[in-house]
Image (cartoon, rainbow, N blue to C red):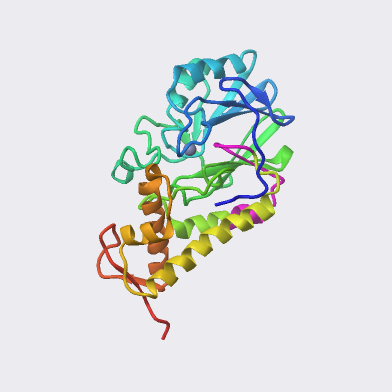
Amino acid sequence: MVIPYVREMAFEYGRADRVSPLIRRVVAQNPGPFTYLGTGTYIVGAREVAVIDPGPADKTHLDALLEALAGCTVRAILITHDHADHAPLAADLARRTEAPVLGARPTPSRQAEKPGMEEGSAPSYRPDRVLEDGETVSGPDWSLTTLATPGHTANHLCFALREENALFCGDHVMGWSTTVIVPPGGSMTDYYASLRRVIAGGYDILWPTHGPPITEPGPFLDAYLEHRLKREAQILELLSRGPANIPQMLSRLYMGLDPRLHRAASASLLAHLIHLIKTGAVAADGPPGADQAFRVIAPS
Ligand SMILES: [Zn+2]
């Protein structure tokens, strides 16, 4: 997908860059097919700060964050969701700063994704308190309001920084790629609703965990949604020529895809198909899965 409205980002691993009057960013050195350049950890505020998504359990990143936080009091460590590239460092950072860990509800272990699928949920993640939709955490010069945005995961949260009309969007929206949606925790139906929620918020800028900020959220998000709806139309068009299973759809709809992303693309197809079953456009003969054949339901 070619995404307009996104710029390159200047950074160096482990360096705290001031990216707005209230925001600094430190990027962890965990680049990969799902994390792009790495996890961007945000520090919000001047002296009394919030840290958003401390990142993977990585000693070098912890040291970089502690250096950036020297002279600051950490009021809260906020977590958008419990994937292994976002949450595991929270425990160590909390121990070193005595700050509470607040944010996403931990994923029930029965729903946890298999390791190797995206980054997977971190079983070690235990927040001091789960934040509910609409709850605000604040410091002297900032306030961050929780926006529940299920889709990428069932527990995903974004945080709106009122003072800059900005949104920390975690993996809900990525500045470089589409978001991976892995059922059963991930849901395309919820994802559409959560994207529309962010569009309706009218933010001036989005700060994703991976990649550069999105400085024109309106047209960007419209294109982002459009891309998903186009994929949906492609699935329906393909199935209108006869039933097909996910491996067959993958080879026809994702030609030339990086093999490391095949499982993620299969999961996204499954997420689309579950959504299309819900809307009554598609049917399967059993519980939707990889070997199942899907077919379109002709409108009566
Ligand atoms: Zn991530």
Q: Nearer the viewer, residue 61 or 94?
A: 61
Q: Quadrant of residue 32?
A: top left
Identify the residue shown where x is 54% and y is 54%.
194
Q: Is residue 40 left or right of residue 283?
A: right
276 is higher (above) or lower (below) than 103:
below
The foreground one among 236 and 289 is 236
Residue 132 on the magenta segment: no
Residue 297, picture quadrant? bottom left
Residue 34's spot in the image, x, y percent? 46, 39
Residue 106: horizontal and vertical position, in percent?
Answer: 40, 39
Which span is picked out in magenta? 196-212
157 or 59: nearer the eye?
59
Label count reads 0
Residue 187 as seen in the image, left or right of residue 229: left
- Image location (x, y in percent) of residue 266: 36, 53
Residue 201 shows up from this direction: no
Depicted 168 relative to depicted 139: above or below: below
Measured as percent of width and height from the top left, residue 242 is found at 33, 74
Q: Is residue 162 visible?
A: yes
In the image, 240: left or right of 147?
left
Dividing the image into 4 quarters, which one contains the C terminus? bottom left
Q: Residue furthest front?
A: 256
- In the image, residue 88 sits, relative to residue 203, either above or below, namely above
Vertical relation: 77 (above or below) 158: above
Name the residue: 48% across, 50% down.
150
Q: Residue at x 60, y 28 (%)?
A: 50
